[in-house]
């Protein structure tokens, strides 16, 4: 593989920093373990066996115990609900993931409900949305309590989907956080039944939470278990066990630079909100939350904010949808941390370059492990760029986390290499995306190693990165070099294809390739007469000139999915060429015209 820190590109592409001028130099290498096969067969079989054991009389016997007469406190839900969804609930409709169920004859277990809707309904997430619109607890209880009664009647005993550990953890959090909506009844039989159910779910999680794989669903289960341990009388041992589990798990999932192991910013946001919710349990009874919560947020939140472009929106990376500014602002207010990540993401694989009004975020890491993220993207070395509030270059987006699901074909297309602003050889993904029948779209073989070097000085900012995603299939290594001038008005790059070392060679026929730059919404592109560039007019009126050396530039249709799920028709610049002797070099630049 081409080594990070090898000879800089020619002056025509990106200027090389002089050694005495460089202020900071950083280099690293990230590995994806042998293609990563996801959960092992043994782990999958163990999960199925556990689900069967939970349905046995022995487990039901373990769930018996005293029920609390009351809860010790009510934690504050840190996230406001969706008023639109709340209003629909008051009108008798439970709407989620594009599916509607009428409450008057609701059957939670109906096979007509899609899986995403069932998880939302069984997790009682809808309580958050209902709470956003009801004028007081009494009026809200008239709507919430019949829905809870119907759920308890249907799922009073273990059922695999409704009692899944992560769903049960969320249900505990929402039941505790919105207890006034569901425990205001004067019907003592109903109150006792619900309080007994809450205690039973906690006893179920005493075992089930710790048997989940180390990923975000396990955090959901342990967060609910911790809150229950704090707020149900006599739960000190339970809270301590859950906290110890969270301590170990968060050390694996939250990286030293604040990135998240799944590499999806939507997961980092969900994790931060979970930690805020769970930390509200001790606060509700006048105790200080354990330092674990604040310490983890102090790493998560700056890294998350640092991925936002000038429009304050985080792009749709690795399966997750783009994140709007409002949840980031809300998180920054609740978590007393900094506001920007460090420039280099040695562990997370994300890097940020900024100067003047320009901001770049680069994915310079391998795809996430399949066991952590089934919906990762094959967009290694892609980047996004903004000029002030305008997105200049972007990726097409992501689907997970949207209020309504995208069409399956569109969601799958967003994961491809071609949907990212990066180089793609022979219209082939740099990391294989498996079919639905093959581990449900998990990522397969491809990028295993990414090497990175960054430099910063008074001359500007440099980043050089390489990946081996095409080494085994085509015998080629891809390297991208970027330079951003000190004023942010000059971005220069070079994309290089080199022959892979013989040890990685399978075949080495010459291939066609494309370098794609998906333009932000509202950016108008006009080709130059020589087909070697384009003029780009941004929504705020600024103009950028794009030029390429070594390939022709075409303007093609593209799209961008915004945080609300709206599809914006956009354009993309495509530099097309072909390797010669399994090698190629394309230089390109984006320069702002005027101020």
Image (cartoon, rainbow, N blue to C red):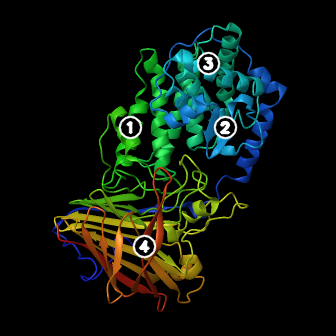
Q: Which sits earlier in the primary sequence, circle 4 or circle 3?
A: 3
Indicate left or right for 483 with 475 as reference. left
How many marks can you see? 4
Residue, disc 4? 572
Residues marked 4 and 3 touching at CB (< 8 Å): no
Residues marked 1 and 4 touching at CB (< 8 Å): no
Q: Which sits earlier in the primary sequence, circle 1 or circle 4?
A: 1
Q: CA distance from mark 3 to mark 2?
A: 37 Å
Residue, disc 2? 211
Q: CA distance from mark 4 to mark 2?
A: 46 Å
Instruction: Tell me which residue sits at (48%, 65%) in the image.
Output: 559
Q: Which sits earlier in the primary sequence, circle 4 or circle 2?
A: 2
- Around disc 1, counting alpha carbons within 10 Å, would you say few (fewer than 14), some (14 to 19), or many (20 or more)? many
Q: CA distance from mark 1 to mark 4?
A: 33 Å
Residue, disc 3? 142
Residue, disc 1? 331
Instruction: Tell me which residue sits at (42%, 56%) in the image.
Output: 315
Residue 357 showing in the rendered view: yes
Among the 4 quarters of the image, the one containing residue 232: top right
Residue 257 showing in the rendered view: no
């Amino acid at each position: 593989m081409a080594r990070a820190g090898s000879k800089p590109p020619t002056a025509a592409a990106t200027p090389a920093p002089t050694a005495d001028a460089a202020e900071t130099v950083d280099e690293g290498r990230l590995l994806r373990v042998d293609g990563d096969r996801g959960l092992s067969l043994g782990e999958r079989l163990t999960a199925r066996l556990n689900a069967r054991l939970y349905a046995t009389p022995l487990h039901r016997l373990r769930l018996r115990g005293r029920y609390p007469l009351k809860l010790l406190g009510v934690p504050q839900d840190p996230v406001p609900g969706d008023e639109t969804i709340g209003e629909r609930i008051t009108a008798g409709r439970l709407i989620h993931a594009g599916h509607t169920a009428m409450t008057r004859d609701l059957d939670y277990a109906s096979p007509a409900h899609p899986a995403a809707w069932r998880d939302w309904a069984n997790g009682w997430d809808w309580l958050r949305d209902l709470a956003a619109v009801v004028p007081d607890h009494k009026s809200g209880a008239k709507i919430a309590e019949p829905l809870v009664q119907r759920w308890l009647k249907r799922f009073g005993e273990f059922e695999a989907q409704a009692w899944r550990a992560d769903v049960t953890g969320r249900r505990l959090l929402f039941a505790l956080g919105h207890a006034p909506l569901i425990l205001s009844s004067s019907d003592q039989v109903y109150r006792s039944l619900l309080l007994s159910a809450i205690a039973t779910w906690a006893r179920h999680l005493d075992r089930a939470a710790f048997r989940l794989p180390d990923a975000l669903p396990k955090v959901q289960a342990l967060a609910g278990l911790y809150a229950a341990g704090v707020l149900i009388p006599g739960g000190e041992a339970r809270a301590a066990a859950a906290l110890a589990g969270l301590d170990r798990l968060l050390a694996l999932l939250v990286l030293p630079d604040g990135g998240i192991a799944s590499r999806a910013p939507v997961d980092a946001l969900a994790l931060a909100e979970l930690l805020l919710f769970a930390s509200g349990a001790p606060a509700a009874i006048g105790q200080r939350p354990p330092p674990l919560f604040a310490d983890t947020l102090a790493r998560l939140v700056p890294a998350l904010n640092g991925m936002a472009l000038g429009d304050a929106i985080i792009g749709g990376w690795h399966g997750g949808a783009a994140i709007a500014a409002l949840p980031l602002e809300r998180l920054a207010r609740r978590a007393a941390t900094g506001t920007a990540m460090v420039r280099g993401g040695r562990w997370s694989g994300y890097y940020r370059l900024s100067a003047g009004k320009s901001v770049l975020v680069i994915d310079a890491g391998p795809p996430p492990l399949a066991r952590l993220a089934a919906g990762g993207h094959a967009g290694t070395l892609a980047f996004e760029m903004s000029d002030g509030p305008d997105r200049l270059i972007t990726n097409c987006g992501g689907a997970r986390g949207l209020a309504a699901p995208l069409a399956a074909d569109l969601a799958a297309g967003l994961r491809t290499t071609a949907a990212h602003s990066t180089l793609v050889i022979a219209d082939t993904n740099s990391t294989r995306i498996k079919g639905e029948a093959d581990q449900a779209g998990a990522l397969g073989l491809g990028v295993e190693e990414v090497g990175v070097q960054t430099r910063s000085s008074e001359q500007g900012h440099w980043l050089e990165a390489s990946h081996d995603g095409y080494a085994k299939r085509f015998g080629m290594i891809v390297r991208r070099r970027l330079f951003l001038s000190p004023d942010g008005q000059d971005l220069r790059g070079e994309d290089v294809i080199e022959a892979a070392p013989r040890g990685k060679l399978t075949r080495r026929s010459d291939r066609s390739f494309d370098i794609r730059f998906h333009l932000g919404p509202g950016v108008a592109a006009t080709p130059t007469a020589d087909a070697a560039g384009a003029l780009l007019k941004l929504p705020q009126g600024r103009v950028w000139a794009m030029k390429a050396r070594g390939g022709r530039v075409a303007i093609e249709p593209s799209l961008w999915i915004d945080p609300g799920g709206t599809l914006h028709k956009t354009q993309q610049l495509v530099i097309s060429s072909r390797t010669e002797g399994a090698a190629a070099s394309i230089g390109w630049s984006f320069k702002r015209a005027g101020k």
